[in-house]
Image (tube, grey):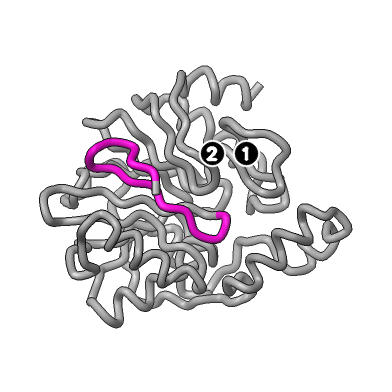
Amino acid sequence: MDRVTSSVFRAEGTAVNWVILREGRDLTLIDAGYPGDVDAVLASVAAIGHRPEDLRAVLVTHAHVDHVGALNHLHERYGTPVLMHPDELANATGERHESATPADVARRAWRPSVLRWSLAITRAGGTQHPVVTHARGFEPGVPLDLPGRPVPVHLPGHTSGSAAFVLPEAGIVVTGDALVTGHPLLRGTGPQLLPDFFHHDTAAARHALETLGRVDADVVVPGHGAPWRGDLRAATARLVA
């Protein structure tokens, strides 16, 4: 668990992050790990002295299996609302599938790093396809009335409804998979894109970096990798170039 600020926390599950925003006794959760990470999600809430009942909502950067694993448990057990970009709802309900396939992974499994990662995520439920029918859409660009006052920013490319969440008061942007700082299949660390086969539309994912570069934030909390501090505009410009 990383304490990014006194009210923003990053927790790591099976090679994936989720973020907790705190305001008094109320919490916002951003993303929810793999299905096998449910207990870890609950433990991260307990680690900062809270209960699942304190969650006012879960925000979803995108509806891939490694970001939605605890959603149904939280909704069914605690009634926690789930919000995502309207364009992502079809991925959540299973009407649309914009994710890497088992065949995409299998073609690369000769690489030891891919094999180790694929075995780990399979144990965590990575081959499952959770169906989240209770999710609702938010209005992009409008501050959400939730702890942290996150502002959604639409960044299509990784998926059609991929979104980041800006925390203006903290100067933080939670980027999901639109921008990461590390992953078992990447060689280095620091701001970068995931390998192309993870993206629904690679060209759009690169274009989304230009939008992200205009965000007023100097701390990135990504879906994969450690928090990063620096000049976000310069970092995204290098990647676009």
Residue 193: which numbered mark, if any? 1
Residue 167 lies, in percent from the top left, at 28, 37
Q: CB atoms at circles 1 and 2 under 8 Å apart? A: yes
212 and 46: which is toward the camera: 46
Q: Which residues are magenta?
A: 2-15
Image height of 180 relative to 209, above or below? below
Q: Give the residue type that dot 1 points to.
A: Leu
Instruction: Choose the circle earlier in sequence order: 1 or 2.
Output: 2
Q: Which residue is mark 2?
A: 179
Question: Badge 2, how many Cα within 10 Å: few under 14, some, many 20+?
Answer: many
**226 displayed left or right of 240:** left
Q: Which secondary structure, mark 2?
A: loop
- Residue visible at 67% across and 49% down? 184
**114 displayed left or right of 27:** right
Image height of 240 relative to 32, above or below? above
Residue 18 lies, in percent from the top left, at 41, 54
Q: CA distance from mark 1 to mark 2?
A: 5 Å
Question: Badge 1, how many Cα within 10 Å: few under 14, some, many 20+?
Answer: many
Residue 113 lies, in percent from the top left, at 77, 52
- Residue visible at 34% across and 59% down? 44
**4 displayed left or right of 28:** right
Image height of 74 relative to 8, above or below? below
